Amino acid sequence: MTGPLPAREAALRILADVRRQPTLRVPLDDALGGVLAEDIVSPLDIPAWTNSAMDGYATRADDVRGASDAAPVRLRVIETVPAGAFPARAIARGECTRIFTGAPLPEGADTVVRQEDTDGGSEVVTIVNGRDAGVNIRRAGEDVRRGATVLAAGTPLGAAHLGVLASLAVAHPLVYRRPRVAILGSGDEIVDVDRPDEILSGRKTASSNTHTLLALTRETGGHPENLGIARDTPESLREHLLRAVDADLIVTTAGISVGEHDHVRTVLDGLGVIHRFWKLRMRPGAPVGFGLLGGVPWIGLPGNPVSTMVTFELFVRPAIRAMMGHALPFRRARHVRLAEPVTLRPRLQHFLRAVVSEGAAGLEARLTGPQGSGILTSMVKANALLIVPEGQFDTPAGATLPAILLDDPAHQADPPF
């Protein structure tokens, strides 16, 4: 290992070592948020037949063109076709079929006159408006053609994609398996929320990081597995880490700094970890480690709550997305205008919590307030991470900086920092 790395180099090293997960078929309703692992080629036209786009009367355009209140057209109704049924007769000049939305158009028809432009007759109908001549039909194959690739491998599956798969009778799409992410907190000073008396009395600190990481992992698409809270002893850390035998990714929080109670590195060394890096040139979040433990990627995050969330966003979230098969693992950065000056020390790349909103001159950013790494409520207020380059100590109001918008659905292949 070398000295502290830039955040960008660290992110690239992590991606180089994580592997896309195996594929499996899942029930369609469980595929939301997954990534398709095969091309979907349509076995049919959609719609499968030309059908009505509304309730009304299927007619010939030549019969109804020019109809009006002053010059109505009267047609003989030869049958009624509801949705789910098929017409039994073709229509000829002067004839029509009572039809409902989604029902196949009878042979000879090229128009559906909406029912409000008629008198609603059941044997003979009077058409009083010819505006629908040639329209209100859905032609066979106008959405999807048989043999067309409808969805390509690598497509992230949203609600609309599941609807398309359902229309093609794909009950079990092939997707990349969601990674199992083992999450471990550590520290003698922290307890879980099932011990409220100790937390509320101030004797112990709640393990907010555990629940934050479980939620962030689930939100990203991974399957979180809570390894619990290890004590600040090598024995406890080793025991908890050995529980991650089935994990695809291990994420720890705290215990990787240089204090005398920080035993994570010693324990990992004893378990045979291959270290890739240990510290970064960034704030918050300098104490970040990465390595391979029995071939499983391990990412060690800092213990301060804000540092945990920021480093998850920059390093763990892209790793999970890459393992799920996403070709674009990183959120993009947008350029924003500072609404206030920013002064920083020391000489590190900074990721500041900010609120970005639309201003008169475009996107505008303000800090959430104090930027201490223990102020977790700043992450509640923030919708962006403002990126200040290493060595840029004073940035005046009005200057432009890149910002990662935390609610931006757009992603990119490379780190934006």
Image (spheres, rainbow, N blue to C red):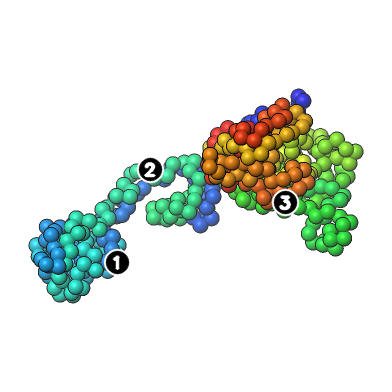
Q: Is residue 57 left or right of residue 402?
A: left
The residue indicated by pointer 3 is: 377
* Residue mark closest to the camera, 1 vs 2: 1
* Residue mark closest to the camera, 3 vs 2: 3
Location of residue 215 with respect to 59 vertically, above or below: above
Sequence-wise, the earlier of marks 3 and 1 is 1
Q: Is residue 399 left or right of residue 392?
A: left
Nearest to the observer: residue 364 or residue 417: 364
Q: CA distance from mark 3 to mark 2?
A: 46 Å
Does residue 364 appear in this view? yes
Q: Position of residue 173 (x, y in %)?
A: 48, 50
Numbered circle sitting on residue 83: 1
Badge 1: how crowded within 10 Å, few (<14), some, or many (20+)?
A: some
Query: Residue 324 appears in which quarter of the rendering?
Result: top right
What's under tag 1, amino acid-wise? Answer: Ala
What's under tag 3, amino acid-wise? Answer: Thr
What's under tag 2, amino acid-wise? Answer: Thr
The residue depicted at 63 percent of the width and 45 percent of the height is 355
Sequence-wise, the earlier of marks 3 and 2 is 2
Sequence-wise, the earlier of marks 1 and 2 is 1
The residue indicated by pointer 2 is: 149
The quarter of the image holding the C terminus is top right
The residue depicted at 10 percent of the width and 66 percent of the height is 71
User: Given contact means CB atoms under 8 Å apart, are the residues at marks 3 and 1 in contact?
Assistant: no
Badge 2: how crowded within 10 Å, few (<14), some, or many (20+)?
A: some
State the count of labels: 3
